[in-house]
Image (cartoon, grey):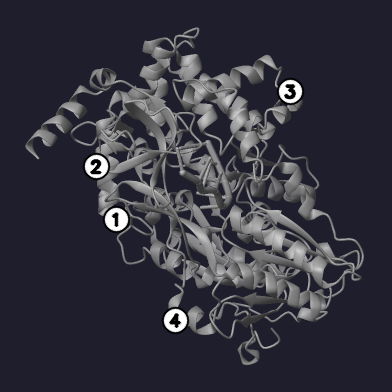
Amino acid sequence: MANFWKPGSERPVTRPSVAFRGDEEIPLGLFEDSSGNFEKRRHRHPIYKHRHDLLYLVKTHAVTVVIGETGCGKSTQLPQYLNEAGWAEGGRLIACTQPRRIAVQTVALRVAEEMGVTVGAEVGYSIRFEEVTTPGKTKIKFLTDGVLIREMMADPLLSKYSVVMVDEAHERSVTTDILLGLLKKIQKRRPELRVIIASATMDAANVAAFFDTSAEKPKVSAAKELLPDRKPGMISVEGRSHSVRVHFSLEPVSSYLLASVSTTLSIHKLQEPPGDILIFLTGQDDVDAAVQLITTEAEKLNQKSPGLLVWPLYAGLSRGDQELIFRPAPQGRRKVIVSTNIAETSVTIPGITYVIDSGFSKQRFYNPLTDVDALVVAPISRASAEQRAGRAGRMRPGKCFRLYTEDTYCNDMKAETVPEIQRSNLVSTVLQLKALGIDNIMRFDWLAPPSSEAMIRALELLFAIGVLDTDAKLTPLGHQVAEFPVEPMMAKMLLSSSSNSCSSEAVTIAAMLSVQSIWVSSKGRQRELDDARDSFAVVEGDHVTYLNVYESFLRAKQSPQWCHQHLINYQAMKTVVDVRKQLSRLLQQLGFTLKSCEGDTKGILKAITAGFFANAAELEPSGESYKLVRGGQQMHIHPSSVLFRTTPKWVVFHSVMVTERMYMREVAVTDPDWLFEVAPHYFERRKRRQTHA
DNA sequence: CCTCCAGTA
C-alpha cells in the first residue's frame, strides 16, 4: 500500500496558460487565513483587478469570453459592473444564465445582498415555477438557460436585453449549446447585443472561434466605427482555489471500488493532515457498497481512533439524507463522502481536502441506429478529471489521488467530454428549434453538430406523430405541442386526451412521469418497496398505477406522513403537483377544458397510445419477450413495472433502458385496433414493409 | 427473470 502512488508523478493542477491583459499572480498565501473578512476578500479581489479591462472588452466586442475558475467572482461581480457601467439603462435588462435552478437562486441572492437590495427588485431571477422580478424595475435578471430559450419563443430577438451572459458554458449542456447557437444568430440582426460567455476551462478557445464572425459580411448596415469588433475578446481571471497535488496510481487498478476503499484507509492510517475525503464513483450501487466497506474496515482497523464518518451522496437520496453531508465532522474525526458525479458540479461540499477519483462515470449515449438511449460506465475526460481534482482545493491546498496511471491520463482519456448534444436523442431539440422559426435544422450553426442520423431520426419521429408535415414544417398540432415543457410524445398524449375526455388524468400522468422517481431510495428494502408499489398496482399498467398513487396522495391531503408510510418521495410529489398545475394551465390556454373520465381507463389508455404509438411492442410467440414495432428489437418489461409478470399481448412504453437486455420502463397495455386508429398511416406503412421483407 | 450519472422548459 505504501508504494501505491508513484512519487515522481506528483504535480500541481495546471492553470490556463494563455496570455491575457493585465494578468497578475496572486500569492496563494494571501488566502490561507480564515479570519472574518475571508469570504468578502476572496470573492471580490480577483475579478475586481480586471474590472476596467472587462468593461472595455464588453464595450468594444460583440462577444467576450471570460475564463475564470470557480469563485473568481465572474458570476456575481461582473453583472454588477455591467449595471454600474450603464448597460441596464433605458429599460433594458442584463440577463445572466446558469445551467441549474439552484445556481440561479444562489447567485441572485448573493448579488442582491452585495448591492443592498431585495431580490425581485433591481436584481431578480426567473426559473421554472418561480418568477421573481419586477417589470420596469429589475435591471439584472438571473435565469436558467432553458427559461431564456422559452422566452425566445415570444421574443425571438431577445429585445428586452442589452447583454446576455451565459455562465458555466464549459459544461456544454444541450440547452447551453442551443442557446449559444441562437445568440450567434441573433447578433446578426442585433449587432448591438453583447454576449458574454463565462467558462472555467480552456475549451473556451473553441467557443471564441465559433463566435468569430469578423470574416463575414455584416447583415445590418451601420457606420463601421459604431459596430463592435466581431472577433471575440478574451480574458482570464484567477480563481480563489488553492493548489492541488495530483497523485497517479503506479499500476492500473483492477477494481476502482476496492482501490478507493484502500486509498481512503491509507489516508486515514498514514495520519495525513486533517481534512475530509471525497470519493468519485459511478453509480448508486458502487456508492452504497463503498460506504459499507469503508465503515466496516475502519472499525476493524482502529478501535481506539475516533475513526471515519462515512456518507453516501447521489441524486436518489432524500433531501434529508443529502443534508447530512454538509454537517461538519466532530473534532478529530474525518468525514468521507462517497459520491456519484453529482459532486463534480452540482453539489459543493465544504471542507474537502482529499479527492479520490475512480476515473469513471455513468454517461448517456444515444444510438441513432437503434434509436435507443444507453447508460454506460465510461472513462471521464481530462477536463472532468481536473474538475474533480479542483474539488480538493476550495478551502486550502489539497491532494487528489487518481485510481489510474498517468499514462492512461495522457494517452487514453479524451481532452473534453463529448458535448451532450452529440450523445442525445434530438426529438425535443429539433421541435424547439422549429418552434423558434429555424426551418433548416441541418444547416443550423451548431457549436458541435450532432450526427445527421440523429437529426433524421428526430425528424422522422416528429413527422410520425404529426408535429411536422411533409415539408418538415410545423403543423398546427406541432405549434401546440411546442408550447408544452414536456417531450413531444407526452405533449401529443396531452393534446389527444381531450377527445377521450380524460385530460385531467393525462396531465396527472404526464406530471408523474416528469419527475425522476416518485419512490424513495430503496437500497436493502426492495421487498418493502415492491409491496408498496403493488398496493397501488392495476392491470392497465404503470401509467394508471401512477394515477392511482396521485389520487391517493390527494385523498391523504398531501400528507408527508402518508408518503413516508407508502415509501413515496414527498418532495417528488410536491414537484408533481406544481408540474400538473403548469400543464393544466397550458392546456386551458389552448382552449381545452380539463375533463375527467371518472374511472373509464380505456380512454386513458387510448390517449397514452395516441402519444406513444411509436413505442409500441408486441409479445413474441414465446411469451417471454416483446418485439418493438419500430426497429424490431427484442425488449423486456422492466422488473420495476407492475406489468412485469402479466405480459399483455400489446404494450406501449415511455422509456427504454439498456443494460444486458433492453428494458421497457413505464409500460401501459394497448390494443392493435387503437394503434391503427390513432396512427393508421404509420402502422399501414410498417405492415407493408413487413410483408415485403 | 431486478435499475436508475446529472440537469431542465
**Residue at the extreme bottom:** A8
Picture coordinates of residue A100 (x, y %)?
A: 60, 48
Q: Which residue is mark 4?
A: A411
Q: Which badge, 3 or 1, is on the more N-terminal residue? A: 1
Q: Is residue A496 left or right of residue A22?
A: left
Side of A443 where A564 appears, left or right: right
- The residue pinned by badge 3 equals A559
Q: Earlier in the sequence, mark 4 or mark 1?
A: 4
- Residue A49 screen position, x and y as percent: 70, 71
- Left or right of residue A365: residue A237: right
Q: Nearer the viewer, residue A330 or A91?
A: A330
The chain containing the residue under callout 4 comes to A
Task: Report if residue A476 is visible in the image.
Answer: yes
Q: Chain of mark 1?
A: A
The CA distance from mark 4 to mark 1 is 26 Å
Q: Chain of mark 3?
A: A
User: Where does the N terminus of chain A fall, quadrant-wise?
Assistant: bottom right
The reply to whether label 2 and label 1 mark residues of one chain is yes
Residue A398 coordinates in the image, percent (x, y): 73, 76
Contact between marks 2 and 1 (CB within 8 A): the answer is no
Q: Name the residue nearer the viewer: A237 or A410.
A: A410
Quick check: A83 above or below A55? above
Label 2 vs 4, first from the N-terminus: 4
How would you rate the neighbour count of disc 4 (Cα within 10 Å): few for under 14, some for 14-19, many for 20 or more? few
Instruction: Tell which tag, 3 or 1, sits nearer the viewer.
Output: 3
Q: How many marks?
A: 4
- The Cα–Cα distance between marks 3 and 4, rounded to whole angstroms, is 55 Å
